[in-house]
Image (cartoon, rainbow, N blue to C red):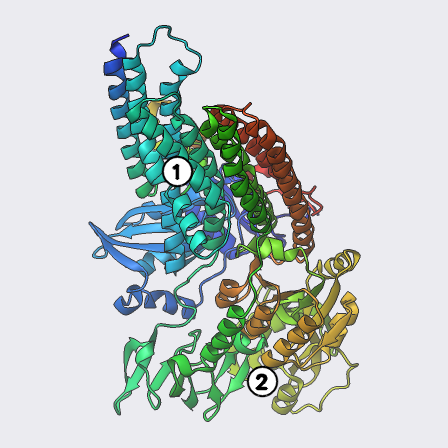
Amino acid sequence: MIPLNCFHCGEPANGEPAITLLLDDKQRHFCCQGCKAVCETIRREGLAGFYDFRTEPAITPRQLTSAELGRLRELDHPLVQQSFVSPVKAGQEAQILIGGITCAACIWLLENHLQRQTGVLSFTVNHTTQRARLEWASDQVQLSDLLIAVHQLGYTARPYHADEVENALKVEHRSMLIRLAVAGIGSFQSMMLAFPMYFGMVNDLSSDFVSFFRWFSLLVATPVVFYSAKPFFRNASRDLRSRHLTMDVPVAIAIGLAYGASAWVTVMGGDEVYFESVCMFTFFLLLGRYIEVQARYRAGLSGNALVGFQPRVATLVTGSNSETNVVAAHSLKAGDVVRIRPGETLPVDGEILRGQSTLNEAALTGEYLPETRIPGDTVHAGSVNGENALDITVVSAGAQTRLSSILRVLDRVQSEKPKVARMADRMAGKFVGRVLILAPIVWLGWWWYGADNAFDITLSVLVVTCPCALSLATPTAITAATVKLRKLGLLPTRGHTLESMNDVDTVVFDKTGTLTRGELSLVNQHSAGTLDADQCLRLAAGLEAFSEHPIARVFHDLPKALISNVKNYLGGGLSGHWGEQTLYIGHPQFVAEHSGLALPEAPECTGIAIWLASDQQWLARFQLDDQPRADAANAIAALHDLGIRTLLLSGDRSGHVQQIARQLGINEAIGQASPEDKLAVLQKLNAEGCKIMMVGDGLNDLPSMAGASVSVAMGSAADLTQLKADAVLLNGQLMQLVEGLATSRQTRKVIRQNLWWALIYNLAALPLAAAGLVPPWLAAIGMSASSLVVVLNALRLGKMPTPARESQPLVGSMALR
Amino acid sequence: MEIVVVLVPLMLMLVTGGIVLFNWAVKNGQYDDLEGPAHRILYDDDKDRIPEDAITGLEKTRRPTR
């Protein structure tokens, strides 16, 4: 039987009974009802062209639970909308972050599907950032309906709100582009006006014409100098005041002198004007700066300031009839009672007043299994509520919660980190100092020699030695390396990340969610009774379908038997009726208690044991465990090959820590570490002189991540962790860490090569310029040529490694070829 | 040669107009997404512009329903 793959997402589609749909006269198979539902929606809207021109399989859609639906509906509340919705002419506008986009066809599908909904005025998705701008008429449709429409296709939608840092970067990026355009056009025009005078193309050029061309060149060069070149002047004066010699100082001097001298000559008469050199010079330097700003803008885009990682509103319970109103989270005080619905994140620290439920405290402790909490228990802000609603008495809110104190520790540790000095700036500083001393000497020399073009020669010296190539050396290499890493799935989010990754000699891993997948999976099944294994599995799946607990979710995608009268016992298990038999599934103590059977004999197993029994006999034991990632062992081995030491640091209390370390071959493992313990370990390593890269995924890892030179957050990590980390590993493939380290070393080599080339060029050109052999226009051209060499060298970094991964199953129309 | 006296200022005014337009385009966010337009031209969403008598067979099923 040929293994079939799902037409929509490419996953294996071998469920019983087969899920199929007739599409364009062909029978298509799907892995689940979700994929089939999405395909039907697509076909109904006439958008089946999606399957023809997509280049990647889509992600498997997930059904929205009622808790998630409730949270989406919350977004209609005006208080919540305050932070990400703004009114526009015909309605309202919001920015949405879309997840699950795999190729351009997804964007086409989304835009078309949303634009057909009533009330949508416009919906566009940015291909680079995967953010959508939605404009809708608020009197015709609600925002939550439109977000549900996005989910209908299998994508996720979250409201997005740019923070000030990103807005500032965007403004800088835009203004840099305009400056570049002005400088570029200025160089064209001034070159055009200067051309006739270069080669004496037009004979008998009367002095009137010469003056005419000069005045217009002045007109063209003025905005270039005062607008486009303003950043150079600003930086130079700032650097001079703080007594640093950076590359901007000679640049500013050269531009200023050349412009000033040419303006003087235009007004008073003289031999040469240098407007075209000034413009071209500014243009090429700005090009280098623009590339740098572009790289920083792109890096800043990943620092998502998402709405909702800390809830802004809470449901306050007031009065004796328990009426509820929605209030702002920061207005809560100690003693207030708030109601937390299933699936909601807690906004405060408090004590449970009413209700019992399971709480997922992964954000704070890293434990992915929820704990049962009953009235009287203390709960913390940042935990996610499980199955039942809870009423909480507030103990501390706002800045006093434990979550806020973790963040404060983080900020303090980050501000104490020493800044990585940029390599290029250090080299340039020394060079610039020497040039600035040399230039007046050259001028004096020629003037004393009696030449009348001493000034021109000095100008050429300044222009030629101006480290244009030097200033391009680093940004181009870093940009090329960043683009390549992004394609691999490792996203540097801070400017220093690539350079810091160079020196790393120790890598510290967190366990759950980093080395392991962070979710349970069925490892083994052991039959204990008379029913066969397959039937036991169906019974288990049928029972567990009624629970949202992570243990139950392992069984959700399996074929189910029909079980009736299912009861969910919090913290224990489930019971139900199948035919005449009563079945129980859950922890062994729970099943033994309810079925009356004695605890079974069974060989020891790692992980969690879930037993299935009827009231007469034990039927089966399921072993669930958190599996390490498929490439974890390879990644550890590759890191050892690079000469890097590995460490496992986990808050887990069980022996799982040592077991995983042994299994993967990690050098050292430390378990039972609280966030403070982790930070202490890192500080000890720092004191020994190690350069550490820390890979983690939880908020409890945050303070220790700040103690490392480079911190990497897994793509599945909490939003806040991703925000504060230096890099994000988007697809969870640990091998890309190795690739990232290798690329970082290569980048340093390329930067070194570029810097050497720039230096050699400048040192060779300097005596030529000092000897008077280089007119200013040739100096400008020579500089551009050297910059080109630098850029081309940096582009070499962009070559992708040959893909070693197994080919993905072909989907859609590509499977027909 | 005297024509240059007219041409040069004229050209400068044109260029200034060009820069003003570019300024507007950048501020309007048209340069924020440089990869999108490359994909958009390849989208195949003009099926509802094909006149009735020109469509055959398969395309009939692809017509969007409202």
Q: What kind of residue is marked 2?
A: Gly
The quarter of the picture where residue A371 lies is bottom right
Q: Residues within 10 Å of mark 2 (few under 14, many from 20)?
A: some
- Note whether residue A532 is visible: no
The quarter of the picture where residue A676 lies is bottom right
State the mark number for residue A816: none
Vertical placement of residue A383 versus B22, above or below: below
Locate the C terminus of chain A by quadrant.
Answer: top right
Q: What kind of residue is marked 1?
A: Gly
Residue labelled with disc 2: A572
Residue A553 screen position, x and y as percent:
57, 70
Confirm whether circles 1 and 2 share one chain. Answer: yes
Q: CA distance from mark 1 to mark 2?
A: 78 Å
Residue A448 screen position, x and y as percent:
50, 30
Residue B7 screen position, x and y as percent:
26, 15
Depth order, front residue of A69/A55 = A55
